Image: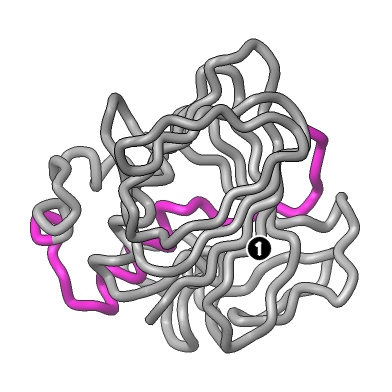
């Protein structure tokens, strides 16, 4: 994975802010996601990172999109206990040293050093390639480290929307429903994201591809 200079506030802070805005307790969110309250607490405090499947389950339970996790809180005061300090105009992000409000446009040209990055559990990294405000589209450069997987164990994930992917480097195993596919460079996939699926890298080199997921409200 290349070095990048645009850092995002920890994803756990953003999840906690969304949970509090939604008026949901930590235990209620854990029940909705199907994980322990301890895991949700560890994610919110930055002691653990969510897997891809857990992140989608959390956003579904909180009725937000993955784009909202990137963009942070809506305008208003920070969540109680946050160490971000008082903010106006919503959670701010540093892009080329300039503060940008939540929901800002990413582009029209995004240089490698300006990509926003989310590092998830199980060796998965997302780099944001662009964003138009008001859309629920995840346009990402996705890297699966050797041994990386979108879900813990044999769990398959499903979420709303349509999913398109194109593999650039390495190999990626895709479980899609009851079928197994081995993706190699140049292979493309497209399917409804509601189909149970999982990605994993069984190889010894990173698997890198471009993914486009259109999330439905």
In the picture shown, does residue 38 fall above or below 85? above
User: Which residue lies at the image location 49% right of the left edge and 28% below the top edge?
Assistant: 200
Q: Is 30 rendered above or below residue 89? A: above
In this rendering, position of residue 167 left or right of residue 53: right
Residue 30 location (% of width, % of height): 15, 52
Q: Nearer the viewer, residue 99 or 208?
A: 208
Q: Quadrant of the C terminus?
A: bottom left
Q: Position of residue 187 (x, y in %)?
A: 69, 40
Q: Is residue 138 above or below residue 30?
A: below
Nearer to us in this view, 181 or 68: 181
Picture coordinates of residue 63 (x, y %)? 30, 75
Find the residue positioned furthest to the top.
Answer: 204
Rendered position, 127 above or below 173:
below
Question: Which residue corresponds to mark 1?
Answer: 139
Numbered range of the magenta stretch: 1-28
Is residue 16 on the magenta stretch? yes
Residue at 73 percent of width and 80 percent of height: 105
Residue at the spot x=62%, y=61% of the render? 212
Q: Quadrant of the N terminus?
A: top right
Q: Is residue 17 left or right of residue 11?
A: left
């Amino acid at each position: 994975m290349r070095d990048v200079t645009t850092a995002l506030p920890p994803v756990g802070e953003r999840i906690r802010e969304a949970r509090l805005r939604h008026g949901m307790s930590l235990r209620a969110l854990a029940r909705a996601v199907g994980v322990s309250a301890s895991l949700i607490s560890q994610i919110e405090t930055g002691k653990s990172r969510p897997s891809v499947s857990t992140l989608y389950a959390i956003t579904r339970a909180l009725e937000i999109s993955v784009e909202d996790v990137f963009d942070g809180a809506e305008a208003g005061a920070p969540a109680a206990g946050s160490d971000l300090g008082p903010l106006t105009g919503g959670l701010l992000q540093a892009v080329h040293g300039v503060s940008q409000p939540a929901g800002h446009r990413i582009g029209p040209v995004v240089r490698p050093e300006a990509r926003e990055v989310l590092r998830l559990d199980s060796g998965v990294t997302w780099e944001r390639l662009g964003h138009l405000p008001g859309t629920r589209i995840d346009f990402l450069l996705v890297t699966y480290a050797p041994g990386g997987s979108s879900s813990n164990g044999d769990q398959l994930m499903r979420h709303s929307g349509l999913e398109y992917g194109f593999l650039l480097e390495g190999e990626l195993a895709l479980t899609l429903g009851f079928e197994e596919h081995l993706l190699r460079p140049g292979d493309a996939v497209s399917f409804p994201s509601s189909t149970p699926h999982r990605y994993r890298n069984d190889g010894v080199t990173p698997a890198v591809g471009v993914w486009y997921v259109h999330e439905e409200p």
